[in-house]
Image (cartoon, rainbow, N blue to C red):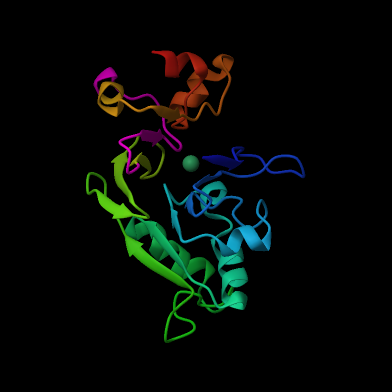
Amino acid sequence: MRIVGAHNLESRGTRYMSLLVDEELAIDAGSLASGLTFEEQARLSAVLLSHGHYDHVRDVPAVGLSLFSMGRHLSVLGESDVLNMLRSHWINGTTYPRLHEMPAEEPTLQFHSISPGESFELSGKVITPTRMNHTIASLGFRIEDGKGRVMFYTSDTGPLPPTFWEGVSADLLIAEVTMPNAWQESAISAGHLTPELLKR
Ligand SMILES: [Zn+2]
């Protein structure tokens, strides 16, 4: 697993949220173009989108245009609201080309709707999207590889009950802690965690 970006503020030295599993399965698309070479982008087979916030989906159009120019394609998996937002606001033929419809014979971006609690197989892994606690609908992802190893990515989330965390039981936990302990009230109202809130 490789962290391409893990920030919610972007600069030359900080990138928006993107993880890579085995160099071909991406989780969130905040920095999938800005953080990867063209050769690395060409290796991507799928991206899981946790939610529709800008810092998690920003590079979908950019990586899409790269792959279009290479004649490659990418599966884009997210909740239907997120996919609809991309279609209507970004790759709408005005802001950016309609990469989910072109080329017609095999579109570059191939959208697949997913739902919390409905597991599916992808790239030899079993992936279970899980509802998290954020200001908009957001998914965490439990990913089990072929050897029984489990990683869990929380994406953006506020506090969840202890019973939730008992059910996660992962070998590798990637959790957000967007805000410092001193900002606890802001974190709770914005659907984020602090190190102290995560510890609870
Ligand atoms: Zn968010």
Q: Magenta segment range? A: 145-163
Q: Is residue 7 above or below residue 84?
A: above
Residue sitting at the far bottom: 105
Image quadrant holding the C terminus, namely top left
Q: Is residue 161 left or right of residue 152?
A: left
Residue sitting at the far front: 147
Along the line of sight, the residue nearer the viewer: 28 or 93: 28
Q: Is residue 172 above or below residue 105?
A: above
Q: Residue 194 at x, y = what percent?
A: 51, 20
Q: Residue at x 42, y 61 (%)?
A: 76
Q: Residue at x 57, y 76 (%)?
A: 68
Q: Residue 124 at x, y = what percent?
A: 34, 52
Majority SS type along the magenta span: loop
The part of the image, by quadrant, that contains residue 164 is top left
Q: Is residue 192 left or right of residue 148?
A: right
Q: Residue at x 42, y 47 (%)?
A: 50
Q: Residue 192 at x, y = what percent?
A: 47, 29
Q: Residue 41 at x, y = what percent?
A: 60, 61
The part of the image, by quadrant, that contains residue 100 is bottom left
Along the line of sight, the residue nearer the viewer: 189 or 17: 17
Q: How many marks?
A: 0
Q: Residue at x 51, y 17 (%)?
A: 195
Residue 159 located within the stretch drawn in magenta:
yes
Residue 89 located within the stretch drawn in magenta:
no
